[in-house]
């Protein structure tokens, strides 16, 4: 450690900053000294000219005295006006420099904060992506567990050959009037469909995984679920989760109007998401990321098509339950950002 104390080097000028104390200005500067000297010089010349030098008595009078005083003190007043103007100009110039330094300090602090936030957010984004990958693997494992068949109680009984029978059944189904096996399956119950659109609550949600497995066997619902899963994953990268949103729920008749083709102010209440942070982040991602934009528009088209087919036979209770799913909340958020309800 050296023996120097802070502030010992007074030759280096003190930098101006937003939190620095303004420099102490001298009470009398060079401008005031110059104005005082000019004033004394002018008064001396005036006294010599009007007092010492004799004047003609005929010119003495009130008007002559007024002109004399005006000639003496008017230049002095002008000198001090000029001095005050110069001093004010210097003060304004110093304050302008100080303000510019404060703006530069704020800008540098903002840039540093943004850089630190970007550096600190990278580990959290990586951690979230790892959690999503783990959850997806756990979901696949659970679905695979549910899709397997339980063996008979007799362990000595040989397992039936399922693949040739399945192949034969598929061949027969294909040959019968050209219909695919998916067309011959019974329609998906609305309760399972709504449950699947909300996705399983946790890894222990057996009913949720069962509904999701049944919905994935239907081609149309599987396409919507896949599109919803894509946008939910992309939104989670921005820290937007559907469970955190608390949208204003629209009445079932508003949803029915939307399914029947009504647009504009009549169905604007469907965009009930009011969270400004989620709307701003989604709008920014929509403008900057073409992959996110394509996935969002694909999801909106799938949801619109699905709800048009779902609405005619659905009850008000089923429409209300559907509107409260995670998939519907994503539709409200993305639809409001994309202008679907305008």
Image (spheres, grey):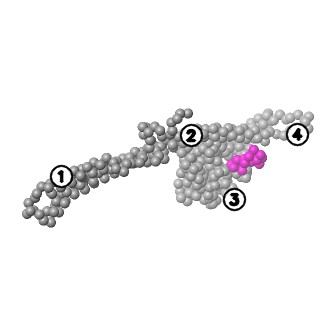
Mark 4 sits on what residue? 152
- 305 left or right of 172? left
Viewer-nearest of discs 4 and 2: 2
The residue lying at 73 percent from left, 52 percent from top is 191
- In primary-sequence order, the first of circles 3 and 2 is 2
Task: Please say if the residues under marks 3 and 1 sit with CB atoms less than 8 Å apart.
Answer: no
Instruction: Give me the C-alpha separation between circle 3 and circle 1.
Output: 103 Å
Task: Please say if the residues under marks 1 and 4 sit with CB atoms less than 8 Å apart.
Answer: no
Outermost bottom residue: 62
Q: Secondary structure at mark 2?
A: helix
From which residue to which does the magenta span run? Answer: 195-209
Mark 2 sits on what residue? 116
Instruction: Give me the C-alpha separation between circle 1 and circle 4.
Output: 128 Å
Instruction: Give me the C-alpha separation between circle 2 and circle 1.
Output: 69 Å
Outermost front residue: 52
Instruction: Give me the C-alpha separation between circle 4 and circle 2.
Output: 61 Å
How busy is the neighbourhood of tag 3: few (under 14 within 10 Å), some, or many (20 plus)?
few
Instruction: Give me the C-alpha separation between circle 3 and circle 2.
Output: 48 Å
Task: Please say if the residues under marks 4 and 2 sit with CB atoms less than 8 Å apart.
Answer: no
Q: Secondary structure at mark 3?
A: helix
Position above or below: 8 against 198 = above
How busy is the neighbourhood of tag 1: few (under 14 within 10 Å), some, or many (20 plus)?
few
Task: Please say if the residues under marks 3 and 2 sit with CB atoms less than 8 Å apart.
Answer: no
Position above or below: 66 against 342 = below
Viewer-nearest of discs 1 and 4: 1
């Amino acid at each position: 450690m050296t023996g120097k104390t802070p502030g010992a080097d007074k030759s280096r000028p003190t930098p101006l900053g937003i939190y620095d104390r303004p420099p102490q200005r001298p009470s009398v500067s060079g401008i005031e000294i110059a104005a005082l000297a000019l004033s004394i010089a002018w008064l001396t010349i005036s006294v010599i000219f009007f007092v010492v030098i004799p004047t003609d008595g005929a010119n003495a009078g009130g008007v002559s005295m007024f002109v004399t005083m005006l000639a003496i003190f008017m230049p002095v007043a002008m000198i001090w006006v000029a001095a005050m103007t110069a001093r004010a100009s210097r003060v304004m110039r110093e304050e302008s420099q100080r303000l510019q330094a404060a703006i530069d300090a704020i800008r540098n602090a903002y840039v540093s904060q943004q850089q630190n936030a970007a550096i600190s957010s990278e580990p959290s984004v990586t951690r979230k992506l790892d959690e999503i990958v783990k959850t997806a693997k756990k979901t696949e494992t659970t679905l695979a567990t549910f899709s397997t068949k339980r063996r008979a109680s007799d362990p000595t009984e040989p397992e039936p050959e399922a693949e040739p029978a399945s192949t034969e059944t598929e061949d027969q189904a294909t040959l019968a009037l050209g219909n695919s096996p998916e067309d011959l399956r019974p329609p998906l119950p609305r309760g399972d469909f709504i449950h699947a659109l909300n996705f399983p609550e946790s890894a222990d949600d057996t009913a949720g995984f069962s509904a999701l497995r049944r919905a994935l066997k239907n081609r149309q619902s599987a396409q919507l679920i896949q599109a919803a899963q894509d946008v939910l994953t992309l939104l989670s990268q921005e820290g937007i989760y559907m469970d955190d949103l608390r949208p204003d729920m629209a009445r079932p008749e508003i949803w029915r109007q939307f399914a029947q083709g009504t647009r504009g102010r009549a169905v604007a209440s469907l965009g009930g998401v009011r969270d400004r942070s989620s709307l701003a982040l989604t709008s920014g991602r929509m403008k900057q990321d073409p992959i996110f934009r394509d996935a969002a528009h694909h999801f909106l088209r799938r949801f619109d098509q699905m709800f048009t087919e779902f609405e005619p036979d659905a009850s008000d209770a089923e429409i209300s339950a559907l509107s409260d799913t995670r998939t519907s909340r994503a539709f409200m958020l993305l639809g409001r950002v994309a202008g679907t309800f305008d």
